[in-house]
Amino acid sequence: MDHRSGAVTPAAQRLSRPLDAIDVPHKKVEKICCLGAGYVGGPTCAVIAFKNPHIQVTIVDLNAARIAAWNSDVLPIYEPGLEDVVKACRGKNLFFSTDVDQGIIDADLIFVSVNTPTKTKGMGAGYAADLGYVESATRHIARVAQGDKIVVEKSTVPCRTAQSMRFILEANSRPGIRFDILSNPEFLAEGTAIADLMNPDRVLIGSLNTDAGRSAAASLADVYAGWVRREQIITMNLWSSELSKLAANAMLAQRISSINALSAICEATGADVDEVGYACGLDSRIGPKFLKASVGFGGSCFQKDILNLVYLSESLHLPEVAAYWRQVVEMNEYQKKRFLNRIISCLFNTLTGKKVAILGFAFKKDTGDTRESPAITLCKYLRAERANVAIYDPKVAESQIWLDLTEPGVTDDLADLQKQVSIAEDAYSACAGADAVVVCTEWDEFKCANLDYKRVYESMNKPAFIFDGRLILDQKQLEQIGFHVETIGRPRSNFTTPKDWE
Ligand code: UDX
Ligand code: ADP
């Protein structure tokens, strides 16, 4: 993958501890356990097993259905290339199990890859990470461990979580057991997880700057050295490593909010956001990645990590810093609302009873994950406008869509929801009879080369509108078919004013 060049800049080398910091005497890891068989733990530890046939890797989870799926032919998550990796080593040196105790007892090194959602209640609700799962996993390790362990934070956690983990471990374990805590944040992106893991930009390992800390870091570095060049394995202090993960995600999301803010100016002025992004990206100081305007960023990390950073800043009495990062999320919300307003105003200011086809429900292409997907927000807005919504996504399970669109605990809401929302088998049936088609996810199958838009057009109510929230459509080609095309970051078409009225 070209965006993972593997280059480590001189600045990175200067900032990290000297590379020989990981060449200290250390134990060889023979058995790894991963707590949490989710989007992070599953692919990461599958690749570790694949690249280290001499290491036994056991991924455990409390969720029996999830483990059963990992052991079946239909894996619980869709990720290109994952199936091949799992099939190559499952049953040999890669195991999926619900026996958390045994996994912990056997392992020399334990990855903690459990969920860290945003708190919904109590202090810091809506901002702070809910560390309940991390704490309970940590207590589990303390309770059952019978020997020394290296415990690795893989989940994204607030700065200084390692300290709390160590405190809990030491207070609850058998006497004489030693725990070394490392931070080893995961930078994989969904949809490209396997490629990112196989060829990472860098592997970051944070440890205490003590002999024991460096030795534990060296043990983990050895695992990655199974396929990653030593120069790309960066070691640093624990707190820098924890914060770097939040910082990297915040900066990536900030670029998207920046280009999305510019997309609003483009729409109002006649500039084209793709051209502006291209021109800016050619400046080597800026670079071309993460400058694609969209209906908004989604995913389990960006919003959560920025809000976490906001909370951290507030707790440290840094309100200006908190406000700065909060604006990145606010711009993302604004972008979704702006897109909805454009749909409403183009459809003659009312959506009541009109059919709107939503193409794509995942938060990005090549994943079935819908966490924080902009399509969810958009569907909720469209429902409030009394539109009838037909959703199609190539990978998202129908049950997941219903779950995302239903408020938790309100059972009869589903029946009400289903009066207004339907899920289609393919793009053509979603679009049939629609007044508007809205592209929410950039799946390749929605591109003009892959979908018969003439057929789509012929099946729609006229005038037929198409809203491109991902800048993947060929506007000219669609206009020739007869569509009114509205694209994020491009000016509105002046289709409602007849020529002789101008
Ligand atoms: C992100 C980080 O990239 C990854 O390093 C980290 O480990 C987890 O969080 P992920 O959320 O899986 O990964 O996907 P990413 O490719 O970063 O996309 C996030 C969102 O931003 C998606 O909704 C995507 O569509 C959107 N996006 C991305 C844009 O709108 N424009 C862009 O230019 C890039
Ligand atoms: P991520 O995207 O961070 O991987 P997921 O929600 O996909 O998050 O996965 C986290 C997994 O961790 C879930 O499958 C959940 O059941 C599991 N989990 C949570 N707490 C524990 C625990 N104490 N022990 C083992 N697994 C756990």
Image (spheres, rainbow, N blue to C red):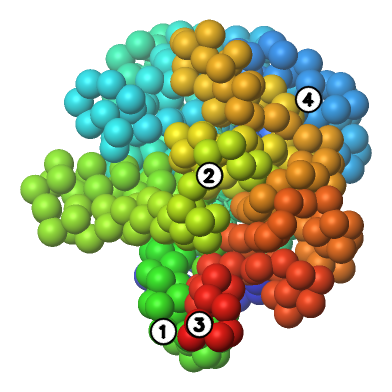
Which residue in the structure is indicated by mark 2? 351
As shown in the figure, which amino acid type bears the numbered disc 3? Trp
Estimate the spatial distance between the alpha carbons at disc 1 and disc 3, rounded to whole Å. 22 Å
Which residue: 91% across, 38% down?
A: 88
Mark closest to the chain's N terminus, 1 or 4: 4
As shown in the figure, which amino acid type bears the numbered disc 1? Thr
Task: Say few, some or many: other residues with alpha carbon within 10 Å of mark 2 (under 14 / 14 to 19 / 20 or more).
Answer: many
Which residue in the structure is indicated by mark 3? 501
Res 199 → quadrant: bottom right
Question: SS of the residue at dot 3?
Answer: helix
Q: Can see residue 244?
A: no
Q: Can see residue 355?
A: yes
Please name which of the two marks, 1 or 2, marks the residue nearer to the observer: 2
Estimate the spatial distance between the alpha carbons at disc 3 and disc 4, rounded to whole Å. 63 Å
Which residue: 15% across, 45% down?
A: 314
Mark closest to the chain's N terminus, 1 or 2: 1
Which residue: 79% across, 77% down?
A: 480
Please name which of the two marks, 1 or 3, marks the residue nearer to the observer: 3
| Location of residue 167 with respect to 211 vertically, above or below | above
Ligand 2 placement by image quarter? top right
Which residue in the structure is indicated by mark 4? 70
Residue sitting nearer the eye, 345 or 213: 345
